[in-house]
Every structure is written in structure tokens, then in C-alpha cells.
Image (cartoon, rainbow, N blue to C red):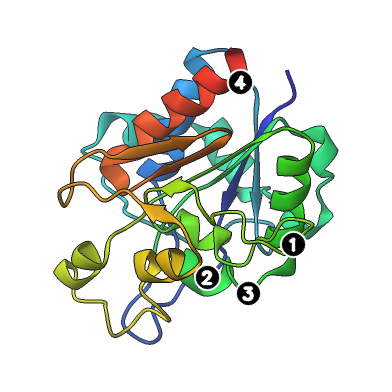
């Protein structure tokens, strides 16, 4: 089995409203699933190297287990630069969230190129929370957005308002995806919600991270 490529944001600032980065549990919880299922994993980020981290809840036992593991920390710190990876080497791409993703995922050409390539070679494309920001500029060879006509879950506008960042983020993610033709599948705020549409797997929020990992693993092992 080729590895799953977990991709993290390299953007560490909420437009002057505090630090951000990738949300730790949106990496560790799917990773725990992938490792349990015997699926290999590689790490990448937009700029490569050690990406900024957010959501450092070390009362979460999964977060604590990985964050206190020197091997995990070293692998994250040595993340590949996304533009330099060969998509043919991977079975799936998984975009972790964290508010930083809304800034650099949509504006990075490598996100579009690598995602389309993995999709076109029959791989799984997945994302959670703000991670689906990666899908806002991905088009298929015919020019149609990847998300058009497909069921998608992502951080909702209501959740963005609940954290008081609706006027800080560059755009409201669920609104943007809907404008691209996605069939949005919102669940209640802060509850697990996953949408699976063929080889596209998306989740709404941090509470959905484990279930997204399980859905990706199921597709890869089926």
C-alpha cells in the first residue's frame, strides 16, 4: 500500500488576530486510525519543514501520546514541501485543518496539482474542518470543480461565527464550497459529521477527525 499523504498548513497567523497553524487533533486522530489499520503515512506541508501548530490540547490522550513521542515530532518537523512530492507515490491525500489552512491551501498551486493528480490516478482525496479549503480551487481536466455536485462536509459558517472569526478569515469555507456546486452536508455544531462521495471524504470539524480517518481507511482497504 502506498502511503497516505497528510498535508498541513504552513500559515501561522490569523491576520493579526493571534497565532494559528494545523490543528493537532486533526492530524493525530486520523493518524491513530491509519496506524491501527496498518496504513503507512507521510507528512507534507505547504512550505516544508516544521509547520506551526494550533489546538494544543494535551488533555486529549491521543494528542499527548503523539506530541510526547520524539519520532512523531521529528517526522512532523521534517515534513516534505508539498510542491516537491510525487503524487504517484501516494494512495491518498488528507488535508488537516486549522485556521491557517484557509489562507495558504487555496492560494498554493501545488495543492491543486497534487490533489488533481491523486484523484485522476484513482486515489482518495480527503480533508477535515478547514482542510477542505484545499478543494476550493481544485478542478478536473474538463475545468469543473472537483467538489461540484458532490457531497461535502466542512467547518460551517455557524461554527465560524461561534468562534468569532467570520470577519477575520478570507472567506467562509462552507459558503465558498457551496458556491462551487458542492452539496454541503452540515451537522449540528461541534458534532461529528462526515461526507463520503465516492473517493472524496470530508469532515466538518475536529470532532469528525477520527471518523474521517476511518472512512479513508475503509476505502483504501476495500
Q: Which residue occupies 84% across, 37% down?
A: 88
Measured in 3D between alpha carbons, the distance from the residue under mark 4 to the one under mark 2, in whole angstroms, is 30 Å
Q: Earlier in the sequence, mark 4 or mark 3?
A: 3
Image side of residue 81 versus residue 70, left or right? right
Question: Real-space Cα distance between discs 2 and 1?
Answer: 15 Å
Q: Secondary structure at mark 4?
A: helix
Q: Which badge, 3 or 2, is on the more N-terminal residue?
A: 2
N-terminal of the pair, mark 4 or mark 2, is 2
> According to the image, label 2 marks what residue?
11
Q: Nearer the viewer, mark 1 or mark 4?
A: 4
Which of the two labelled residues, at mark 2 and mark 1, occupies the earlier sequence position? 2
**Residue that label 1 marks:** 110
**Residue 41's x, y, as percent?**
63, 30
Q: Are marks 3 and 2 in contact (CB under 8 Å)?
A: no
What is the C-alpha distance between the residues marked 3 and 1? Answer: 9 Å
Local secondary structure at mark 3: loop
According to the picture, the residue beneath numbered tag 3 turns out to be 107
Give the labeled residue for mark 4: 220
Residue 21, percent across and down?
A: 45, 63
Q: Give the residue displayed 28% in from the left and 60% down from the top.
A: 156
Name the residue at 68% across, 48% down: 78
Amino acid at each position: 500500500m502506498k502511503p497516505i499523504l497528510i498535508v498541513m498548513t504552513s500559515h501561522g497567523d490569523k491576520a493579526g488576530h493571534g497565532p494559528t497553524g494545523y490543528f493537532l487533533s486533526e492530524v493525530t486522530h486520523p493518524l491513530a486510525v491509519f496506524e491501527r489499520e496498518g496504513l503507512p503515512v507521510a507528512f507534507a506541508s505547504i512550505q516544508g519543514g516544521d509547520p506551526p501548530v494550533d489546538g494544543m490540547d494535551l488533555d486529549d490522550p491521543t494528542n499527548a501520546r503523539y506530541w510526547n513521542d520524539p519520532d512523531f515530532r521529528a517526522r512532523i518537523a521534517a515534513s516534505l514541501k508539498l510542491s516537491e512530492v510525487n503524487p504517484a507515490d501516494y494512495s491518498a491525500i488528507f488535508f488537516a485543518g486549522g485556521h491557517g489552512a484557509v489562507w495558504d491551501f487555496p492560494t498554493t498551486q501545488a495543492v491543486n496539482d497534487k490533489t488533481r493528480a491523486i484523484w485522476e490516478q484513482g486515489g482518495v482525496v480527503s480533508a477535515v474542518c478547514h482542510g477542505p479549503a484545499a478543494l476550493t480551487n481544485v478542478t478536473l481536466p474538463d475545468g469543473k470543480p472537483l467538489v461540484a455536485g458532490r457531497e461535502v462536509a466542512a467547518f460551517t459558517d455557524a461554527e465560524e461565527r461561534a468562534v468569532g472569526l467570520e470577519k477575520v478569515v478570507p472567506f467562509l469555507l462552507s459558503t465558498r464550497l457551496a458556491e462551487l456546486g458542492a452539496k454541503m452536508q452540515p451537522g449540528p455544531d461541534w458534532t461529528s459529521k462526515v461526507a463520503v462521495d465516492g473517493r472524496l471524504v470530508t469532515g466538518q470539524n475536529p470532532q469528525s477527525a477520527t471518523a474521517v480517518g476511518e472512512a479513508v481507511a475503509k476505502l483504501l482497504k476495500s
